[in-house]
Amino acid sequence: VPEALPAHTMQRLGYILTIYAALQTLLPVPERADAWVRQPNAAPLFGGQPAIIMMAGHVGGLQAVADYLSSEVSAS
């Protein structure tokens, strides 16, 4: 019987899926959505850095990017 994934893994996966879904909504051209995480970002949250920098750190970075993109989807 396979074991369930640890809660922290499920949390990270949830943020990643939220980020993916938001990018697909905001940038429906796959190449643009894929490139967004690697491009410098002028939004204050990112301080000119690509989102991948935040996403590669601790889980709080993933949450911040997911929350940011979710708010962008809500605003559009």
Image (spheres, helix red, strand yellow):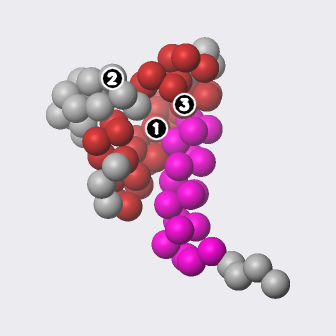
| Residue matched to label 2 | 39
Q: How many badges with numbers are in the image?
A: 3
Residue 13 lies within the magenta run: yes
Q: Amino acid at mark 3?
A: Leu
Name the quadrant containing residue 43. top left
- In-front residue for pair 75/60: 60
Magenta residues (range): 5-22
Number of other residues with Cα within 10 Å of mark 2, as a class: few under 14, some 14 to 19, many 20 or more: few
48 sits left or right of 72 in the view: left
Pinpoint residue 26: horizontal percent, then vertical percent: 55, 24
Image marks 3 and 1: residues in contact by CB distance under 8 Å: yes
Could you say where residue 69 lies in the image, as x and y percent from the top left?
46, 38
Check if mark 3's residue and mark 2's residue have beta carbons within 8 Å.
no
Q: Position of residue 63 (x, y in %)?
A: 41, 55
Residue 6 coordinates in the image, percent (x, y): 56, 77
Q: Is residue 28 above or below residue 74?
A: above
1 lies left or right of 8: right
- Whole-angstrom CA distance, mark 3 to mark 1, is 7 Å
Task: Give the vertical position of 55 relative to 47 (above or below).
Answer: below
Query: Can residue 76 be seen by looking at this rendering?
Result: no
Q: Which residue is mark 3?
A: 23
Q: Quadrant of residue 60?
A: bottom left
In the structure shown, which secondary structural element does the residue marked by tag 2 occupy?
loop
51 drawn magenta: no
Tell me the mark number nearer the camera, choosing from 3 and 1: 3
**Placement of the N terminus among the 4 image quadrants:** bottom right
Identified by mark 2, the residue type is Gln
Seen as rendered, the residue at the extreme front is 1
Q: Which residue is mark 1?
A: 69
Q: Which mark is residue 11?
A: none
